[in-house]
Image (cartoon, grey):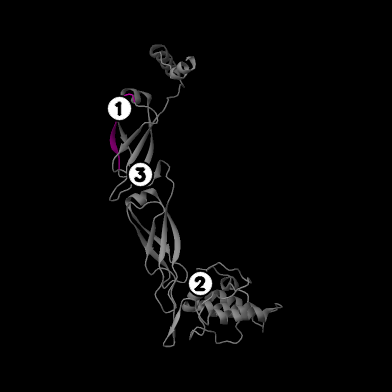
Amino acid sequence: MEYKDYYKVLAVSRDASQDELKKAYRKLARKYHPDVSKVANAEERFKEVGEAYEALKDPEKRAQYDQFGSDYKHGQSFNPPPGWAQNASGMGGQNNDFSSFFESMFSGNQTGHQTGGNFYAPGANVNAKITISLEDAFHGAKKEIRRPAGGAQTGNIEVKIPAGITNGKKMRLAGEGKSGAGGEAGDLFLEISIANHPHYQLDDNNLLLNLPIAPWEAALGAKITVPTLAGKINLTIPAGAKSGQKMRLKGRGLPSKNSGDQIIILQIMTPPADSDKSKQLYQEMAEELNFNPRHELEDNQDT
């Protein structure tokens, strides 16, 4: 038998609302009604549209159908999985015009059971991903996401992102997965993805920041202001600091029981020689300091 993609038949997305399903059905039913349509296979298409709407308009049938997800394509060869129970009362079609796929799909369920004439099946879990900013990961935030199609409820759900959450962490939202057929809904597992930041790099729960400093600050030492996600702090640069040198700000990373640190990586920036005065200063430094940054390389070549 061939798999029928009922969403494709009605030309709607898999998360279409009941109103969207109804509008799509009415539009296509008018288009393919055998009494008025000029399309060659109008009667066949009319029946197909009616079958699709019959499957998707009922939350229990839709939840059962959605358990196959989007793994099958319309027209692909299909057989119910082993163990797909038969004769589940109240779920089969009542119309002899419905296809064998419809009858096979809704005459039972792989994980359901029948009790007292009612069909029961647990809902399926759903995996999703949400991207948040580094600031939201640090401070915590509230985000609205759309509930998955086939869930017990429709519309949006507010998700509370805890402060200190790390990249790849999964949050479990109980009962927010797909509806069961008379049973409990599955869960929604929401994976956290933290977006890249223009200044900070994330290393587990540590924050890395490249900090530009002037040559005289590196040579003489200085007290400067440094940004953190919790606000600005004062930092003392030691005299003789080198480019690439790391300084650790304890507990200034992502907050948790064992909070991460903020790692400062010093980057000595060279001022441009874009004026006569600056060129003169560089010339005086060259003559006065007698500094050769390559002397170790040259000494190694001589030995």
Q: Which mark is residue 66?
A: 2
Neighbor class of circle 3 (other Cα within 10 Å; few <14, some 14-19, many 20+) is many
Callout 3 amino acid: Asn
Classify mark 1: helix, strand or loop. Answer: loop
Residue 301 at what x, y percent from top left? 49, 17
Q: Residue furthest top?
A: 287
Residue at 31% in and 24% down: 239
Q: Earlier in the sequence, mark 1 or mark 2?
A: 2
Label disc, if present, on residue 238 of the rendered structure:
1
Whole-percent x, y for residue 33 in the image: 64, 81
Identify the amino acid type marked 2. Answer: Asp
| Nearest to the observer: residue 229 or residue 68 | 68
Q: With respect to residue 251, does 212 lie above or below? A: above
Image quadrant of residue 202?
Answer: top left
- Label for residue 206? 3
Marks 1/3: CA distance?
Answer: 23 Å
Secondary structure at numbered mark 3: strand
Question: In the structure shown, which secondary structural element does the residue marked by tag 2 occupy?
Answer: helix
Left or right, residue 169 beside residue 29: left
Task: Tell which circle, 1 or 3, labels the residue nearer the N-terminal end.
Answer: 3
> Does 67 appear in magenta?
no
- Residue 51, given in percent of the width and then of the height, sits at 58, 80
Which residue is rendered at x = 59% and y = 70% of the image? 8
Q: Amino acid at mark 1?
A: Pro
Relative vertical location of residue 153 with respect to residue 194 in this rendering, above or below: below
Query: Residue at left 36%, top 51%?
Result: 137
Numbered circles on residues, count: 3
Q: Residue 278 occupies which quadrant of the picture?
A: top left
- Front residue of this view, candidates 281 and 217: 217
Chain part drawn in magenta: 231-240
Cα distance in 3D space between marks 3 and 2: 41 Å
